[in-house]
Image: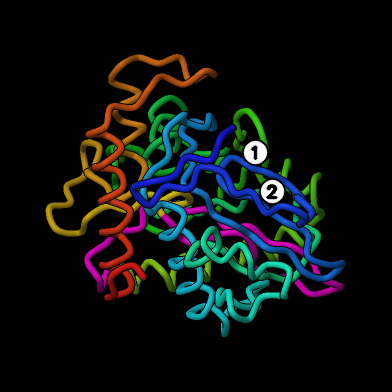
Amino acid sequence: MIPQTGQCVLRESNLTGVKLFSRGKVRDVYEISDELLLIVATDRLSAFDVVMAEGIPDKGRVLTQLSCFWFEMFREVVPNHFLTARVAEYPAELQPFADQLEGRSMLVQKTQPFPVECVVRGYLGGSGWKDYHTTGAVCGIKLPAGLKNSSRLHQPIFTPATKAQEGHDENIDWEGTLKRIGKSAAEQLRDYSLALYTKARDYAESRGILIADTKFEFGLRGDTVLLIDEVLTPDSSRFWPKNGYRPGDAQPSFDKQFVRDYLESIHWNKEPPPPPLPSEVVEKTSEKYRQAYRLLTGHTLN
């Protein structure tokens, strides 16, 4: 792939001489040492677990700077892997790449990630609504009858999923989680996830955003569980405007649901290769990412 530049877009980083650790759907991760990783959030966009051909302007900067915001807010709830996002504080070998790294990268501690995504749902939406509409449950959790699309749940629910570098993530039930990571770890990740979601939900609602659902990832460093990866971004969450919220139908959103809705409207089969995104969809999605950042942090994007 050729890096896409111009209009604040970086579709793929290229740090010559720095060891590439992994290249995911959105992030390029570099191994700096046995203890440190560099995470670069590109402007790639993944919808239905397929990476689109187009980059979204400023997307990577929103993901990074919003994650940094939440990492700082959550430090008293759970420790995390974040060290710094200041390029001037990075090791010397990274300084020549400041133009690629500024505002969209983080230096973090290396951990052993748990092989599950910790999804928390506070509202019925997306695949959760489809599951409930068919079975009356979400990931095996029975819910009250009569709920509508976008209904707020009486209590948030923990609905983990498998992690996939390629292809589709899959929802798993509690028993499936126990088999993968054991009872003690599963209970700890569940409790952390619900506490983080509740704190974020209450804060975001005061800023005019409803967090319908989100996913967290955790890793082990020694015996310590750390919050890792991205946190409560438009990629990992479903953000709805509080103003005008009405259960019974899909809600407008501040996240990549705009792209999902477009792809659903053209009846794409959700398998590679992805269809091209019209320029107006790309531009509108970029604005939604920036708007989410402004509303949640109270600042414009750096």
Left or right: where 63 falls relative to 296: right
Residue type beneath disc 1: Ile
Dominant secondary structure (helix, strand or loop) of the stretch shown in magenta: strand
The image position of residue 267, as x and y in percent, is 35, 14
The image position of residue 238, as x and y in percent, is 38, 49
SS class, disc 2: strand
Q: Which residues are magenta?
A: 205-233
Q: Quadrant of residue 283?
A: top left
SS class, disc 1: loop
Q: Residues within 10 Å of mark 1 (few under 14, many from 20)?
A: some
Whole-angstrom CA distance, mark 1 to mark 2, is 9 Å
Which quarter of the rendering shows the C terminus?
Answer: bottom left
The numbered dot on residue 158 is: none
The image position of residue 200, as x and y in percent, is 41, 69
Q: Earlier in the sequence, mark 1 or mark 2?
A: 2
Q: Are marks 1 and 2 in contact (CB under 8 Å)?
A: yes
Report the residue marked by disc 1: 172
Report the residue marked by disc 2: 116
Residue that appears at 54% across and 51% down: 119
